[in-house]
Amino acid sequence: MSEFIPVLTKEEIATRVKDVAQSISTDYKDRDLILIGILKGAFIFLSDLIRHLSIPVKVDFMCVSSYGSGTSSSGRVKLVKDVDLELKNMDVIIVEDIVDTGVTLSYLVDHLKSSGAASVRICALIDKKERRKTTVVVDYVCHSVQKGFLVGYGLDYAEFYRNLPEVYHLKL
Ligand code: IMP
Ligand code: MG
């Protein structure tokens, strides 16, 4: 039997998302900001985050895949969908569900910088530290954990559990 151990309640998520949105609104006042949500995991986080921003912002999406249906990354990143908006001279924040090895984000940062973005920062719902393999810096974080496979609030296990309103540690 799999076990769901609570990690973040709805209220905790709401508070942290609001705090991060406030920091972004302050840091990017009078700049040309695009938030790029990474599909599919970031779709719920991004949609809550942007509704708490007090500055003008554009939104786009990218889709990459590195995962099979298990709980560890394949280590290769495949670009499934690129951004549609012009990034030249824009300040970009990548919005990601969770940073694990950091391989996906290093790929995305390189890709977006080479698309002409003026700056690229990272905003993640969860920073999972134990398996980091890259030096990627996560600029905005809602919650940090050492390890564990998390689901809910957009995070999936084999495409399930994205719809859970809280975040859980899934013990298989
Ligand atoms: P990374 O390239 O190893 O940093 O992996 C990042 C991607 O792996 C995330 O965008 C997630 O889609 C997925 N991932 C990593 N850890 C978890 C987890 O605990 N739960 C759900 N997805 C995860
Ligand atoms: Mg993801």
Image (cartoon, helix red, strand yellow):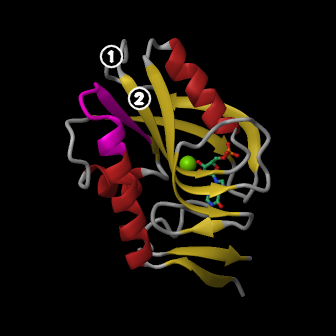
Q: Is residue 99 above or below residue 146?
A: above
Expressed as whole percent of the image width and height from the top left, the position of residue 37 reads: 42, 41
* Residues rendered magenta in the picture: 24-37
Residue depicted at x 43% and y 17%: 117
User: Considering the numbered disc 2 on the image, is that residue within a helix, a strand or a loop?
Assistant: strand
**Nearer-the-camera pick, 41 or 95:** 95
> Taking 45 as reference, is 105 left or right?
right
Total numbered badges shown on the rendered structure: 2
> Taking 15 as reference, is 70 left or right?
right
Please name the amino acid that badge 2 sits on: Val
Residue depicted at x 37% and y 18%: 87
- Residue to which mark 1 is pinned: 86
Picture quarter with the N terminus: bottom right
Residue 130 placement: quadrant:
bottom right
Residue furthest to the bottom in view is: 1
Picture quarter with the C terminus: bottom right
Residue depicted at x 31% and y 42%: 26
Q: Nearer the viewer, mark 2 or mark 1?
A: 2
Expressed as whole percent of the image width and height from the top left, the position of residue 168 reads: 58, 75
Q: Can residue 81 be seen here?
A: no
Per the image, is 29 magenta? Answer: yes
- Residue to which mark 2 is pinned: 92
